[in-house]
Amino acid sequence: MSLQWLEWAQRIQALSQSGLTYATDVYDLERYEELRSISVEIVTEHTGLEMQHVKDLFAVEKGYQTPKMDVRGAVFQHGKILMVKEKSDGRWALPGGYCDVGLSPAENITKEIEEESGYLVVPTKMLALLDMTKHPHPPQPFHYYKIFIRCEIVGGEAKNGVETQGVEFFAEDGLPELSLNRNIESQLKLLFDFEKNPAKATVFE
């Protein structure tokens, strides 16, 4: 299914947000508000989300809009990869999440893995930097980049977090039902390629 509508909605939202940030003329501000409303209508029509929910998402965005960063940890043990079961949808994902302001990607993934799985890790290599829009994730209102970082366990033990209800290692041929907003099978396969070939060069788009 074509997602051209999503690209249009994201571009309209980004333009409206920039306009609301820098414009001073009252009539220009009204036009940018109308553009934001159009982007909300497009996303609502194609996703089934409640209009107020989409409005709230867009309304909290301030300043010049740039892609958001999502960081995911690739932690291997005996040829299997660490995954956590998300409470939000009951499906499995690599530990991680949106990058917090004030923390580097390495600091973010270390924090996320400990909070979601209980393991203490040391980041060792950035494996991939991917543009979410170039992969078959479900439609998202914003534009995301995904950072995948290889990490080694140095302590801790498996423990559920506030947002997780399961911590397990999975083989490449035995992956669980995936939380597709967070990761898809082709991305997991790419990470297993790095496990088999540690010298593989970082992938980026």
Image (cartoon, rainbow, N blue to C red):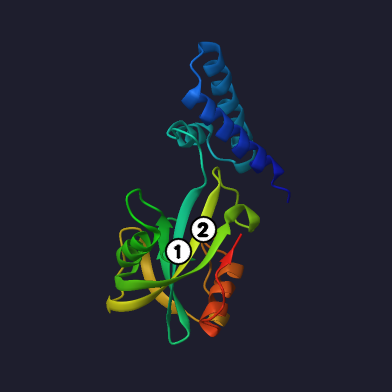
Which residue does the image show at 55% across and 12% down from the upper left? Answer: 27
Quadrant in which residue 192 is drawn: bottom right
Circle 1 residue: 72
Horizontal and vertical percent position of residue 138? 60, 53
Which residue does the image show at 51% across and 36% down from the upper left? Answer: 54
Horizontal and vertical percent position of residue 131? 58, 55
> Disc 2 versus disc 1: distance between alpha carbons?
7 Å
Is residue 106 rendered to the left or right of residue 126? Answer: left
Q: Are marks 2 and 1 in contact (CB under 8 Å)?
A: yes
User: What amino acid is found at the position of numbered circle 1 in the picture?
Assistant: Arg
Dot placed on the residue nearer the N-terminal end, 2 or 1: 1
Which residue does the image show at 73% across and 51% down from the upper left? Answer: 1
Residue lying furthest bottom:
78
> From what the image shows, is residue 26 above or below residue 142?
above
Q: Nearer the viewer, residue 200 or 160?
A: 200
Circle 2 residue: 146
Horizontal and vertical percent position of residue 99? 40, 53
Which residue does the image show at 58% across and 55% down from the upper left? Answer: 132
Is residue 1 rendered to the left or right of residue 41? Answer: right
Q: Nearer the viewer, residue 202 or 175?
A: 202
> From what the image shows, is residue 76 above or below residue 83?
below
Quadrant in which residue 8 is drawn: top right
Is residue 157 rendered to the left or right of residue 97? Answer: left
**Is label 1 in a helix, a strand or a loop?**
strand
> From what the image shows, is residue 42 above or below residue 76?
above
Horizontal and vertical percent position of residue 68? 48, 48
> From what the image shows, is residue 74 above or below residue 50?
below
**Is label 2 in a helix, a strand or a loop?**
strand
Quadrant in which residue 155 is drawn: bottom left
User: What amino acid is found at the position of numbered circle 2 in the picture?
Assistant: Lys
Image quadrant holding the C terminus, namely bottom right
